[in-house]
Image (tube, grey):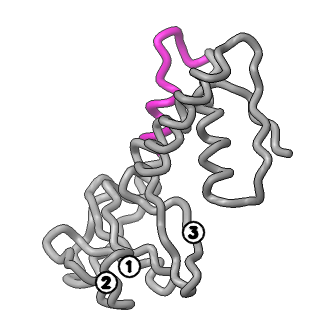
């Protein structure tokens, strides 16, 4: 069954499931959708300019694409999927979409996109792998819940190193 069509909030045109759409990460604007022709510099609901991002397709279409790519194996469907592949595909497929919100002192939120998180996690994972070598190393993450903690955990996943929360 195909995903339901979204409508552009500005012109009312139906957006195909695999068509890019502009969205807003502000919690007041969660369901904002605008087609490329209507996309603008500011969100029409909250007035924000740093909270806009582009989804390359509907969330359901992106999710289907990530899983289809991750589960497409050369040896056949019975083979187990490497979780690193799923994480890496998600970082790539949702690159422009906000993933982590970091609260600021003034009450606003600084958003990290999937693409930015993926690049940071890959860089950190490469460095951890370089320093730890291979051969049964594990990484202990000793920190409070934060964007840095999540990035460290994703870095371990991408580097195929087990992480232990302490």
Residue 161 quadrant: top right
Residue 46: % across, % down: 38, 90
Q: Closer to the observer: label 2 or label 3?
A: 3
The residue at which mark 1 appears reads as 32
Task: Classify residue 77 as left or right of residue 36.
Answer: right
Q: Are marks 2 and 1 in contact (CB under 8 Å)?
A: yes
Rendered position, 2 above or below 127: below
> Image point 44% across, 78% down: which residue?
31
The stretch of residues the image draws in magenta is: 64-78
Percent coordinates x, y for residue 91 in the rendering? 46, 44
Displayed quadrant of residue 29: bottom left
Q: CA distance from mark 2 to mark 1?
A: 9 Å
Image mark for residue 102: 3
**Crowding at label 2, few (<14), some or many (≥20) Cα neighbours within 10 Å?**
many
Name the residue carrying label 2: 43
At label 3, counting other C-alpha atoms closer than 10 Å, the crowd grade (few under 14, some 14-19, many 20 or more) is some
Helix, strand, or loop for circle 2?
Answer: loop
Give the residue drawn at x 36%, y 56%: 96
């Amino acid at each position: 069954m195909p995903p339901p069509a979204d409508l552009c909030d500005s012109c009312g045109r139906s957006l195909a499931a695999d068509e890019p759409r502009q969205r807003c990460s502000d919690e007041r604007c969660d369901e904002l959708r605008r087609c490329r022709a209507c996309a603008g510099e500011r969100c029409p609901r909250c007035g924000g300019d740093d909270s806009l991002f582009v989804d390359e397709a509907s969330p359901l279409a992106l999710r289907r694409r990530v899983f289809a790519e991750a589960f497409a194996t050369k040896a056949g469907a019975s083979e187990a999927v490497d979780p690193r592949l799923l994480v890496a595909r998600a970082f790539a497929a949702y690159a422009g979409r906000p993933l982590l919100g970091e609260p600021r002192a003034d009450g606003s939120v600084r958003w990290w996109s999937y693409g930015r998180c993926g690049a940071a996690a890959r860089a950190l994972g490469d460095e951890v792998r370089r320093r730890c070598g291979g051969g049964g190393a594990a990484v202990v993450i000793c920190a409070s819940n934060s964007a840095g903690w999540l990035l460290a955990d994703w870095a371990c996943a991408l580097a195929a190193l087990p992480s232990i929360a302490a």
